[in-house]
């Protein structure tokens, strides 16, 4: 309720962490406090670490196993990775390099250590495994989307217009054509087919977490601005997301760079801004929302 009063207009549920059917209590709260927009983030072709019994610390230089008798990862990761490939976990907070690969397990060296947590994002840098547009879990969640009041769907790792057409067909089959599709640009494939994605989607989402894994980070700002320019030119709304106020997960005041980032994003034409960990698990969710909204409004004055 306090975040709504601070200016929050929508909330995103990441269904990689559990289905809609398991979150009726959350959905009741969302509707009770009057949040007008409910966004669900599908699993799609996204890859994630499996469920761990407890968080696991790993050190730089350690060797670890992925797959059979090791850390739980999708089989497509094991079958797609080759020696020399680098594997990013949690938006590259942890980085591994494959030393040996078999049909059932990967032996990896830890290049950048940290603490592993369940269900964190996973990517083989520069490698795009053949994964389905919609998983069986996605289809089950779409079956419930209407009765739970979903207004927008975030489609992860969109590779081209065919991915969007597949989702739109699934929505139409369920009588949910009114739901807006927000195509997440998260990898080189999406960038390579950006024009057709802009034409096919209702909105775009510049998802800087995984997008930053697909290129050197110093290239990301220019890519973000290019996507923004092309969306504005086409009259297509876009959302900006990832680490807008990341430091506020643990600090009550953002960095100067973070508020400048928000300001510039609005000035570049962003129609919406999304906080993630800052409000999902951070210590100062209401303060983070206040800084987001006030900075965005300040940027609007200069438009």
Image (cartoon, grey):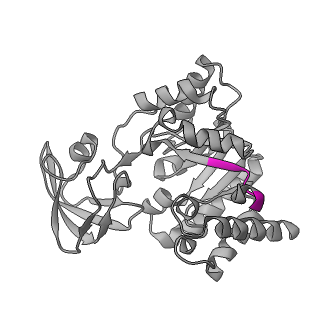
- Rendered location of residue 25, percent (x, y): 56, 40
Judge whether 293 appears above or below 52 on screen.
Answer: below
Vertical comparison of 95 with 270: above or below: below
Residue 116 horizontal side relative to residue 270, left or right = left
In this view, 221 is above or below 233: below
Q: Quadrant of residue 143?
A: top right
Judged left or right of residue 38, residue 232 is right
Q: Is residue 168 above or below residue 232?
A: above
Is 10 contained in the magenta span? yes
Question: Magenta stretch?
Answer: 5-11
Residue 135: x and y in percent read 42, 31
Residue pictured at 68% horizontal, 75% vertical: 259
Q: Residue at x 14, y 43 (%)?
A: 104
Quadrant including the N terminus: bottom right
The image quadrant where one finds the C terminus is bottom right
Q: In x, y percent, where is residue 292? A: 70, 67
Instruction: Give the side of residue 48 with respect to residue 78, left or right.
Output: right
Task: Please name whichever residue, 115 or 170, is drawn nearer the observer in this view of the structure.
Answer: 115
Q: Residue 176, located in which quarter of the rendered image?
A: top right
């Amino acid at each position: 309720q306090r975040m709504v009063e601070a200016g929050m207009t929508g909330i995103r549920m990441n269904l990689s962490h559990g289905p809609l059917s398991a979150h009726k209590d959350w959905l009741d709260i969302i509707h009770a406090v009057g949040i007008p927009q409910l966004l669900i983030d599908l699993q799609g072709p996204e890859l994630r670490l499996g469920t761990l019994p407890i968080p696991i610390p790993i050190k730089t230089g350690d060797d670890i196993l992925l797959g059979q008798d090791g850390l739980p990862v999708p089989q497509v990761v094991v079958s797609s990775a080759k020696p020399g490939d680098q594997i990013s976990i949690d938006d590259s907070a942890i980085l591994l390099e494959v030393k040996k690969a078999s049909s059932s397990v990967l032996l990896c060296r830890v290049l950048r250590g940290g603490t592993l947590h369940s269900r964190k994002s996973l990517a083989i840098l520069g490698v795009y495994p053949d994964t389905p547009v919609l998983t069986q879990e996605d289809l089950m969640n779409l079956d419930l989307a209407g009765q739970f009041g979903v207004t927008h769907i975030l489609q992860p790792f969109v590779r081209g217009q065919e991915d969007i057409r597949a989702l739109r067909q699934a929505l139409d089959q369920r009588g949910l054509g009114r739901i807006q599709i927000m195509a997440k640009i998260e990898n080189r494939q999406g960038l390579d087919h950006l024009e057709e994605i802009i034409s096919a989607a209702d909105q775009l989402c510049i998802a800087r977490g995984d997008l930053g894994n697909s290129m050197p980070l110093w290239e990301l700002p220019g890519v973000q601005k290019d996507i923004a320019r092309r969306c504005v030119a086409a009259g297509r709304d876009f959302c900006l997301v990832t680490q807008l106020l990341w430091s506020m997960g643990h600090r009550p005041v953002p960095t100067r760079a973070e508020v400048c980032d928000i300001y510039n994003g609005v000035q570049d034409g962003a129609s919406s801004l999304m906080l993630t960990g800052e409000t999902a698990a951070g210590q100062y969710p209401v303060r983070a929302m206040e800084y987001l909204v006030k900075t965005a409004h300040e940027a609007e004055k200069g438009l």
